[in-house]
Image (cartoon, grey):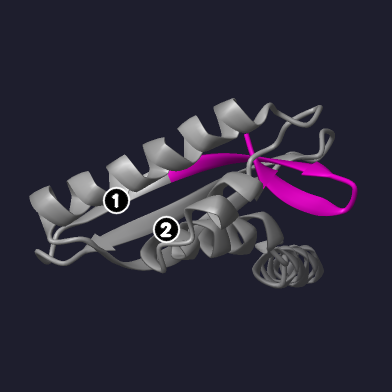
């Protein structure tokens, strides 16, 4: 009986150790953070560059996307005293598809914060926002 208990305890300890040593891949979340940091820096073209498109988009559509990003930041400046910091919270990567959900915390100038989920896709070895 003592031997069974000892073996069971060893198995449980091994399972706990193996679970605690699990590595999370935060590459997609770090890429999403870089794109959102570009909004803070006013680099709207860089933010749009981080979006996933199957084909090149027309210049007029690109200009609209950059204008939308600029308007979003202007609204944040008026309503929340701007976006001050972006933090990575978590990243859940699909085990089959080259996709992930990046969980970010947006910290604003009025001391409020908001958690957002940024769907990401990996193409040509790089993470892009969906």
Q: At which x and y percent is residue 111?
A: 12, 66
Q: What secondary structure is found at the residue carrying circle 1?
A: helix
What is the magenta range? 117-130
- Where is the N terminus found, in terms of image quarters? bottom right
> Main structural element of the magenta stretch: helix, strand or loop?
strand
Q: Residue at x 48, y 53 (%)?
A: 44
Query: Dot 1 corresponds to which residue?
Result: 73
Q: Are marks 1 and 2 in contact (CB under 8 Å)?
A: yes
Q: From what the image shows, is residue 62 above or below residue 89?
A: above
Q: Dot 2, how many residues are within 10 Å of its Cα: few (below 14), some (14-19), or many (20+)?
A: many
- Where is the C terminus found, in terms of image quarters? top right
Q: Dot 1, how many residues are within 10 Å of its Cα: few (below 14), some (14-19), or many (20+)?
A: many
Q: At which x and y percent is residue 116?
A: 39, 45
Find the residue positioned furthest to the right.
124
Q: From what the image shows, is residue 57 above or below residue 38?
A: above
Q: At which x and y percent is residue 15?
A: 73, 63
Q: Residue at x 40, y 43 (%)?
A: 69
Q: Which of the pair 76/92 is nearer the observer? A: 76
Q: What secondary structure is found at the residue carrying circle 2?
A: helix
Q: Residue at x 90, y 47 (%)?
A: 124
Q: Quadrant of residue 8?
A: bottom right
| Left or right of 49 on screen, residue 87 | left
Find the residue positioned furthest to the front.
60
Does the image show residue 42?
Answer: yes
Q: At which x and y percent is residue 87?
A: 42, 67
Query: Dot 2 corresponds to which residue?
Result: 39
Q: Which of the pair 97/39 is nearer the observer? A: 39
| Left or right of 5 on screen, residue 91 | left
Q: Residue at x 82, y 33 (%)?
A: 97
């Amino acid at each position: 009986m003592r031997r069974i208990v000892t073996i069971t305890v060893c198995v449980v300890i091994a399972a706990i150790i193996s679970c605690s040593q699990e590595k999370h891949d935060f590459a997609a979340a770090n890429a999403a953070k870089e794109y959102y940091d570009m909004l803070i820096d006013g680099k709207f073209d860089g933010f749009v560059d981080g979006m996933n498109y199957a084909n090149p988009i027309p210049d007029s559509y690109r200009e609209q996307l950059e204008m939308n990003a600029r308007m979003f930041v202007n609204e944040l400046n008026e309503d929340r005293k701007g976006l001050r910091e972006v933090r990575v919270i978590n990243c859940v990567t699909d085990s089959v598809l080259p996709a992930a959900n990046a969980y970010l915390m947006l910290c604003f100038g009025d001391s409020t914060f908001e958690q957002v989920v940024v769907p990401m896709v990996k193409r040509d070895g790089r993470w892009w926002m969906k």
